[in-house]
Image (spheres, grey):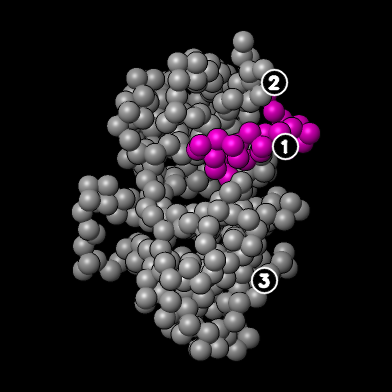
Amino acid sequence: MSHITTFFHEANRARWNGFVSTMSNAHLMQGYEWGRFKTQSGWKLQRVGVEKDGDIVAGAQILFRQLPGVPYTLAYLSKGPLINLPLMTDEQYVISQKLWQTIHQASRQQQAIFLMTEPNFPDAFHIRQYLHQLGFQTSDHTNHPHSTIIVDLNHDEATLLKNMRKKTRQLIRKAGRNGVTIVEGDEQDLAEFYQVIQTTANLKNIPSHQYDFYHQVWQTYQPNDVVKLFFAKHDGQTVATKMVFRFGERSLHLWGGTTRQGRAMQASYLIQWEALKWAKQQGCQQADLWGIPDEVGRLLKRHEDPPKEKRDDLWGVYLFKRGFGGQVESYVGTYNYVYKPMLYRLTDQFRHFSVDSLSTWVERLRGIRS
């Protein structure tokens, strides 16, 4: 028999992370530390698992964001739930049903208008069909990229370089010849990291988090030595930066930025290469370069080549990341489960925001920085 268990105490951290890392759809954002970090950012958290014979066999970290002035919340599963969906047997299907029932019960208790999920499931017809059968509806709004590039790190450094595009290898070496060097940073360097992130956001006209967000992330993960901060320097000036995490067998290259000078120096190529070498040294078998345009993922899934003439910033991100080798991995997308249909329709004007941007908007209404 299986039963539901909650995991809230620090004593549960190692057991929860051990469970997450063994799942086929494991992700850092379902790890214990990510849940703790989000609670520091104003979210409520429920962490639930299905146990069978003393082992956790399915689970989820559910996040809730209170809406201002009303008794309602938004419920969110970031890269969850954790179900071995591609290999599902009849028994696992029953276990998954028990987990979904618990998720819905928790969401209703928190007065959620709807539950948004961006599961770390591969984009496949049978998975989309499974979610529709559960009552979910597709959504065009995203919080995380639904396609990424995964680099296989199970090679020596010479082979990793050989697997890259020739131009990428050349630009890595060019950055070195330009006098770019890579150094590691610490907590006292976060302000400089943030300055480069803000500069990049302004150059590309994209949103970014506020300083406290990155500071809280660092304070959450650094004690466990699973986060690394890299800086590319030229003549003593920071020209690029990157924050990289490791969880289980993967590294996650979440946030980075490059100044105009860094672009001219090709600093982003050298700092990415150093981050990949660090991940390999940490025992990671794969590196998730975190995000390419969803349109690229859709085209490649249809075995169509992305148009070469496109050169906007998002396509530039794809061209940069694909140079490091690796394979495109696409996920099933965003799905919503509606609990309060009338309120859901009323909130349609807000649903073009991502969960993170809507969360930031809520915090600003409260006068809280995140």
Left or right of 95 on screen, residue 205: left
Whole-angstrom CA distance, mark 2 to mark 3, is 41 Å
Q: Of marks 1 and 3, which one's residue comes earlier in the chain? A: 1
Looking at the image, residue 50 lies above or below residue 332: above
Query: Magenta residues?
Result: 6-31
Residue at 65 percent across and 52 percent down: it is 217
Q: Is residue 269 in view?
A: yes
Q: Residue furthest top?
A: 1
**Residue corresponding to mark 1:** 13
**Residue corresponding to mark 2:** 54
Indicate which disc residue 135 carries: none
x and y, in percent, of residue 73 in the image: 53, 29
Residue type marked 3? Glu
Q: Is residue 5 in view?
A: no
Q: Nearer the viewer, mark 2 or mark 1?
A: 2
Q: Of residues 83 and 37, which is closer to you in this image?
A: 83
